[in-house]
Image (tube, helix red, strand yellow):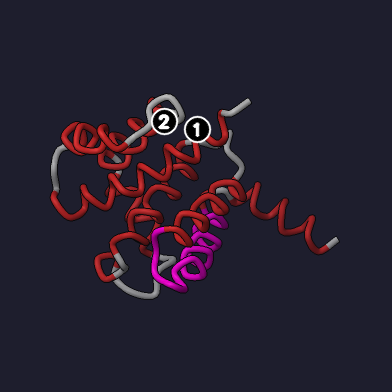
């Protein structure tokens, strides 16, 4: 079953599309259309890619509010690539409870290693650790208590 790799590719393209959206403020469909020539649609979960772009732009305020308390600086001063990755991960934490928070964090860290600054993945990990503890409190606490046993 290749669905996880298709989702991984959807996230990878979504980071690039969100970066573009943050810089241009284009409408979500314009961003999707801009990205399409570069996407191997046979190997990418296109429905998930489109959901990420469309829904993250719709829910930006609640996503940003969830991030605010976990950041050590204003969100706008966070590197734009890392901001895109964080927004995507928080959206998934908020709207996809069927995806374990550790999977979301690991995917975000991998995206940061690929696209972010040299040590950006460490920052992403720290922020998402704090956000996950709030958004996925029960799942987070269960995982943490399992680690100490």
Q: Give me the residue at 35% from left, 42% from top.
A: 14
Q: Quadrant of residue 74?
A: bottom left
Percent x, y of residue 111: 46, 54
Q: Give me the residue at 50% from left, 59% from top.
A: 128
Q: Give me the residue at 19% from left, 37% from top.
A: 34
Up-down: is 75 above or below 26?
below
Q: Earlier in the sequence, mark 1 or mark 2?
A: 1
Percent x, y of residue 103: 59, 46
Q: Secondary structure at mark 1?
A: helix
Magenta-drawn stretch, dominant element (helix, strand or loop): helix
Query: Could you say which is closer to the camera, residue 41 or residue 140?
Result: 41
1 vs 2, front mark: 1
Q: Give me the residue at 29% from left, 38% from top.
A: 38
Left or right: 140 in relation to 44: right
**Label placed on residue 48:** 2
Q: Secondary structure at mark 2?
A: helix
Residue wearing tag 1: 6
The magenta span reads 115-134
Badge 2 crowding class, 10 Å Cα cut-off, few under 14, some 14 to 19, many 20 or more, is some
Badge 1 crowding class, 10 Å Cα cut-off, few under 14, some 14 to 19, many 20 or more, is some
């Amino acid at each position: 079953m290749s669905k996880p790799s298709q989702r991984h590719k959807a996230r990878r393209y979504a980071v690039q599309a969100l970066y573009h959206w943050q810089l241009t403020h284009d409408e979500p469909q314009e961003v999707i259309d801009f990205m399409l020539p570069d996407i191997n649609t046979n190997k990418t979960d296109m429905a998930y890619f489109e959901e990420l772009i469309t829904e993250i732009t719709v829910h930006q305020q609640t996503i940003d509010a969830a991030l605010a308390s976990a950041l050590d600086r204003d969100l706008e001063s966070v590197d734009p690539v890392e901001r895109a990755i964080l927004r995507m991960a928080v959206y998934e934490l908020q709207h996809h409870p069927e995806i374990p928070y550790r999977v979301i964090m690991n995917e975000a860290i991998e995206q940061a290693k690929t696209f972010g600054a040299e040590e950006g993945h460490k920052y992403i990990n720290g922020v998402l650790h704090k956000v996950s503890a709030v958004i996925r409190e029960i799942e987070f606490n269960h995982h943490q208590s399992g680690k100490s046993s």
